[in-house]
Amino acid sequence: MNLKNLCNEVKMLASATGEFLKTEQAALKKKDIELKGTRNYVTYVDKEAESRLVKGLKGLNVLLPEAGFLTEEDTVEFEQKEYTWVIDPLDGTTNYVHGDKPYSVSIALMRKKEVIMGVVYDPVADEMYYATGKGEALLNGTPLKVSSQATLENGYIGFGIPYSLDERGEQVLKNAMRQFRKCSFRIKGSAALEICYVAAGISDTYFHTGLSPWDVAAGAFILHCAGGKCSDFSGGDNYVFGKEIVASNGLIHEEIMRSIIEGN
Ligand code: IPD
Ligand code: CA
């Protein structure tokens, strides 16, 4: 399998899906917006975008042995296969339903338990982040490089508030609050993109609890390929499926773990 050729095909699908999201956002009506839970929105656009993506990715079977799917909107049943597409057709639905930005299309390819490709597309900014291996992480064709910020002081820090905020998640947010005078915090509203911002050297770090694999898999792989670091809240590798992530430029990682995650 030629991963770079496959990635080019996936980028084209992400781009077409992004165009669809953009067109539909302009036409979105109040009646199109449903709630999955408090402040957790979904629309026909999420579902339709996912169906289109799944159909497009199934069409790539000539480049890849038949793959399974793990998707946010469950338009296709999960099947255990050697290869799995992990998809969020619209990451940033809350921004989207409020006529805001950014939002993104996020697609990762896993082989067994390893992510081997990531594509995250922001259709409003027309920014395509993608990676196929270490040192092969790009934004619209330009190599990505993480920041050199080594301290929390004066850091530029992304984070998010999960739909389901448990005590542990709340404690981490309280720990972050204690650092408000030291550094700048931002919530942009699309986890996949916000992890890519770390890969691009815009943010120095990003942390979040309660995320799902489709929010994280592509962005975290892109960051890893750009020379950054991801971990779960114990410092381990279970950040795609473990519902908690610290993503960073590597240099600031330990201090974030200590000050924000452990609260010391
Ligand atoms: C959400 C976004 C948001 C994050 C949420 C995610 P969705 O994904 O990534 O930034 O804070 O926890 O679930 O629902 O827009 O696909
Ligand atoms: Ca989504």
Image (spheres, rainbow, N blue to C red):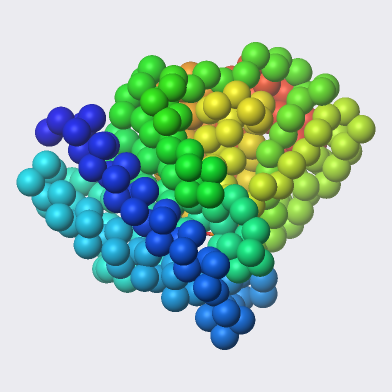
Asked if residue 232 can be seen in this view, the reply is: no
Instruction: Kindly identify the residue that appears in the image at 58 percent across and 62 percent down.
Output: 96
To which quarter of the image does residue 21 belong? bottom left
Residue 129, percent from left and from top: 44, 35
Residue 255, percent from left and from top: 72, 23
Asked if residue 32 can be seen in this view, the reply is: yes
Residue sticking out furthest to the left: 62
Residue 217, percent from left and from top: 42, 43
Closer-to-camera residue (64/48) = 48
How many discs mark residues in the rendered view? 0
Q: Quarter holding the N terminus?
A: top left
In the depicted structure, whether residue 258 falls above or below residue 90:
above
To which quarter of the image does residue 249 belong? top right
Residue 212, percent from left and from top: 49, 54
Closer-to-camera residue (80/67) = 67
Q: Residue 74 vs residue 262: left or right?
A: left
Residue sticking out furthest to the right: 181
Instruction: Kindly identify the residue that appears in the image at 54 percent across and 43 percent down.
Output: 125
Instruction: Kindly identify the residue that appears in the image at 48 percent across and 59 percent down.
Output: 22
In the depicted structure, whether residue 100 falls above or below residue 198:
below
In the depicted structure, whether residue 77 falls above or below residue 160:
below
Q: Quarter holding the C terminus?
A: top right
Instruction: Kindly identify the residue that appears in the image at 73 percent across and 57 percent down.
Output: 167
